[in-house]
């Protein structure tokens, strides 16, 4: 049985780092360029694999050199790619990422082949796994179908609710845990998240809608709410240079720890440390941490 199956986006990232992010209509000269593998699905798969989970990827790339490179990169991380399809009509997805000197970022994507990932292809490829980890970079109908099948098969389903969009009631009710940052939580619940208390209010809405646990990001940390109560995890202060992969490191680590049978509070604590480490390296997949590094940070 696979520990984690990841259903999600696969992109090539083109990243420029500069002094600050541009205003609309403005050009800012940067000083550093990186091209590398990305997509939230691919990033989270790499994160889980580096944290000792066995991982399979379900996704779609174009019939181009960038798609071949993404598949090769997943294979090099030990990730199963038998369910990564190749689309003849659409190019591999692209993300244009701007990173400021303080680590803040903005992203513009062209999803390409990600939007061609269909329901039979995705739901039929789940196999047996302990955890299904999904995001929203592939069609929502495809996500819903895969989640229904995973829930029926007894898998724990983790949803990283990005990019932000309203979700069907049944999808939320099928989730073991949903994770959302402040802006995503606002879209999902209507609650404006600006502190720990408002994060708890948003999380309560998500539990009321059927999710067994909710993690909501807020200024300064993440709030976990589940049946046992509320846990606040302050951000761990490290020398940050790029926030691009932090959320994906968090989601991949959370899925890996849940697949290993850890209690959710312990899994979120581990994921919080993984996210902090991911901000210390420029890029997405390159920044996904290894288990030994996370454990070291947790004891310092």
Image (spheres, rainbow, N blue to C red):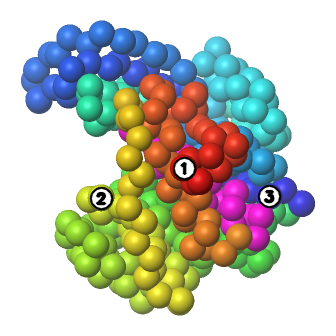
Name the residue: 20% across, 28% down.
21
**Residue closest to the far front:** 300
Q: Which residue is mark 3?
A: 3
Q: Please report the residue visible at 41 percent of the width from the left and 41 percent of the height from the top.
A: 238
Give the label on residue 220, or none.
Answer: 2
Separation of marks 3 and 1 at Cα, in angstroms: 28 Å
Q: Say whether residue 212 is visible.
A: yes
Q: Is residue 186 left or right of residue 139?
A: left
Instruction: Tell me where the magenta segment starts and ends, as one range.
Output: 243-261
* Residue at image location 33% in from the left, 79% down from the top: 200
Nearer to us of marks 3 and 1 is 1
- Residue 16, numbered label: none
In the depicted view, which residue is nearer to us: 261 or 212? 261
Residue 111, position as x, y percentages in the image: 47, 36
Mark 1 and mark 2 in contact (Cβ < 8 Å)? no
Q: Are marks 3 and 1 in contact (CB under 8 Å)?
A: no
Question: Decide: marks 2, 3 in contact (CB < 8 A)?
Answer: no
Q: Is residue 89 above or below residue 139?
A: above
Q: Secondary structure at mark 2?
A: loop
Disc 1 residue crowd, few under 14, some 14–19, many 20+, Cα 10 Å: few
Sequence-earlier tag: 3 or 1 = 3
Which sits in the foreground, 202 or 167? 202
Ranked by sequence position, the earlier of labels 2 and 1 is: 2
Q: Is residue 10 above or below residue 227?
A: above
Q: Is residue 23 left or right of residue 105?
A: left
- Label 3: element kind: strand
Mark 2–mark 1 distance (CA, rounded to whole Å)? 19 Å
Between disc 2 and disc 3, the foreground one is 2
Does label 2 or label 3 sit earlier along the sequence?
3
Other residues around mark 3 within 10 Å, as few (<14) / some (14–19) / many (≥20) = many
Q: Position of residue 60 (x, y in %)?
A: 64, 38
Res 300 label = 1
């Amino acid at each position: 049985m696979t520990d984690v199956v990841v259903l999600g986006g696969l992109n090539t990232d083109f990243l420029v780092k500069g002094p600050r992010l541009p205003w609309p209509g403005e050009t800012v000269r940067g000083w550093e360029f990186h091209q590398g593998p990305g997509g939230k699905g691919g990033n989270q798969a790499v994160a889980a694999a580096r944290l000792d989970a066995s991982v399979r990827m379900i996704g779609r790339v174009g019939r181009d050199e960038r798609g071949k490179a993404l598949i090769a990169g997943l294979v090099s991380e030990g990730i199963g790619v038998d369910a990564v399809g190749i689309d003849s009509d659409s190019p591999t997805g692209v993300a244009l990422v701007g990173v400021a000197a303080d680590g803040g970022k903005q992203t513009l994507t062209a999803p390409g082949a990600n939007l061609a990932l269909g329901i039979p292809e995705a739901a039929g490829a789940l196999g047996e796994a302990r955890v299904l980890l999904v995001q929203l970079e592939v069609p929502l109908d495809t996500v819903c179908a895969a989640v229904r099948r995973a829930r029926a098969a007894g898998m724990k389903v983790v949803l990283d609710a990005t990019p932000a969009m309203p979700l069907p009631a049944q999808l939320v009710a099928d989730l073991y845990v949903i994770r959302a940052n402040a802006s995503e939580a606002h879209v999902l619940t209507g609650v404006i998240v600006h502190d720990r208390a408002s994060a708890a209010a948003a999380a309560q809405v998500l539990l009321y809608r059927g999710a067994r646990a909710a993690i909501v990001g807020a200024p300064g940390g993440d709030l976990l709410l589940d049946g046992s109560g509320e846990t606040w995890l302050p951000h761990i202060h490290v020398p940050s240079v790029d926030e691009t992969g932090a959320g994906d490191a968090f989601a991949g680590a959370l899925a890996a720890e849940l697949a290993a049978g850890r209690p959710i509070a312990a899994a979120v604590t581990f994921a919080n440390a993984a996210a902090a480490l991911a901000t210390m390296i420029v890029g997405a997949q390159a920044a996904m941490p290894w288990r030994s590094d996370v454990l070291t940070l947790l004891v310092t």
